[in-house]
Image (tube, rainbow, N blue to C red):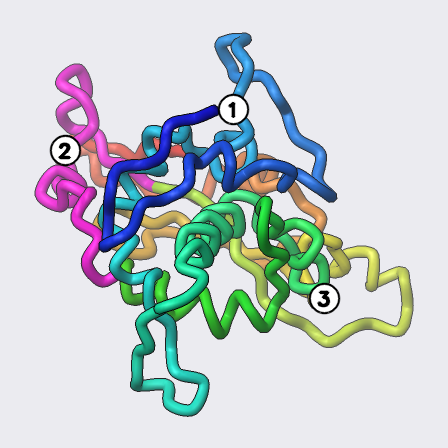
């Protein structure tokens, strides 16, 4: 039996392996790491090893042992019963970020050993606590992150741009000739994709045109490579990508 977690926020918590037990329902997973070793259930479902979850929980616990009053969005209520829900809801938050299930499938994916979380529960009970926690997260070394030349001693003049696509909702076509370009099971609505490039200051340095919603991000990146911005030769700086 796994050891219990250290005392945090006035309570003793379950081992993460017990929180995760039986909660991989309704999703296909890769069970091997890149190095060939087996991934733990926690890593498969949240992307984090149990030791990392414990570290994150030490700062998140005070925000998840309370929830918004159902009658007042500005009032917090501290749990006095079923304290275990705090830890399970935190785990579900990380599952959502890692697996990103569609709204109508959340209750089948966001499952721990003790809870099934649907759309309403997630947005009413979990997201407010997640937002509260996000305001005080201090794991990021901001000076290092915002340093434009933060990459590597071997590349002192390179800048980092993070690339990802985002969706824009469009009207649902009545003709499948057009519908096949905007319907994608990953999203809950018909849409087109736009590729964005964002630097570590949060500045948008590139935005592509519209692409079909079934396009793969890496393919959009390659198709628009000739349009990607570069700094002038005078600065001898260029943009590198993380896809």
Where residue 59 is drawn, which disc sits there?
A: none
| Image coords of residue 220 (percent x, y) | 58, 42
Which of these two is toward me, 107 or 161? 107
Seen at 50% across and 41% down, the residue is 19
Circle 2 crowding by C-alpha within 10 Å: few under 14, some 14–19, many from 20: some
Where does the image place residue 40, in percent across and percent down from the top left? 52, 24
Marks 1, 3: nearer the viewer: 1
Residue that label 3 marks: 190
Whether the magenta-drawn stretch holds residue 143 is answered as yes
Q: Which label's residue is closer to the chain start, 1 or 3?
A: 1
Tell whether 134 sits left or right of 215.
left
Tag in front: 1 or 2: 1
Separation (CA) of disc 1 from disc 3: 35 Å
Residue 185: percent from the left, percent from the top? 74, 54
Q: Quadrant of residue 233?
A: top left
Q: Nearer the viewer, residue 178 or 141?
A: 141
Q: Residue at x 13, y 18 (%)?
A: 153
Instruction: Read off the residue under disc 2.
Output: 149
* Highlighted magenta segment, given as a residue range: 135-161
Total numbered labels placed on residues in the image:
3
What is the CA distance from the residue labelled 3 to the residue labelled 2?
A: 39 Å
Q: Which residue, given by chain and number where applicable, does mark 1 sit on?
A: 40
Q: Earlier in the sequence, mark 3 or mark 2?
A: 2
Whole-percent x, y for residue 219 in the image: 61, 36
Q: Residues within 10 Å of mark 3 (few under 14, many from 20)?
A: many
Q: Residue at x 46, y 48 (%)?
A: 91
Work out whether residue 156 can be spotted. Answer: yes
Please state if 208 lies on the left or on the right of 234 as rendered. right
Label whose residue precedes the other's in the sequence (1 or 2): 1
């Amino acid at each position: 039996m796994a050891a219990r977690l250290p005392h945090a926020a006035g309570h003793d918590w379950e081992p993460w392996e017990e929180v995760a037990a039986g909660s991989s329902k309704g999703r296909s997973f890769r069970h091997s790491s890149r190095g060939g070793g087996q991934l733990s259930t926690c890593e498969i479902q949240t992307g984090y090893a149990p030791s990392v979850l414990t570290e994150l929980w030490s700062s998140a616990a005070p925000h998840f042992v309370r929830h918004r009053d159902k009658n007042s969005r500005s009032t917090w209520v501290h749990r006095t019963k079923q304290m275990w829900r705090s830890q399970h809801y935190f785990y579900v938050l990380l599952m959502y970020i890692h697996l990103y299930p569609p709204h109508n499938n959340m209750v089948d994916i966001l499952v721990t050993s003790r809870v099934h979380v649907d759309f309403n529960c997630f947005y009413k009970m979990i997201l407010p606590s997640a937002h509260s926690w996000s305001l005080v997260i201090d794991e990021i070394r901001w000076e290092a992150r915002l340093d434009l030349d933060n990459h590597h001693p071997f590349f002192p003049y390179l800048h980092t741009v993070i690339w990802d696509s985002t969706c824009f909702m469009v009207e649902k076509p009545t003709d499948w000739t057009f519908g096949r370009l905007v319907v994608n099971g990953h999203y809950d609505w018909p849409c087109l994709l736009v590729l964005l490039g964002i630097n570590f200051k949060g500045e948008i340095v590139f935005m592509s045109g519209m692409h079909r919603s079934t396009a793969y991000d890496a393919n959009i990146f390659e198709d628009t490579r000739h349009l990607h911005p570069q700094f002038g030769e005078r600065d001898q700086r260029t943009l590198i990508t993380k896809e």
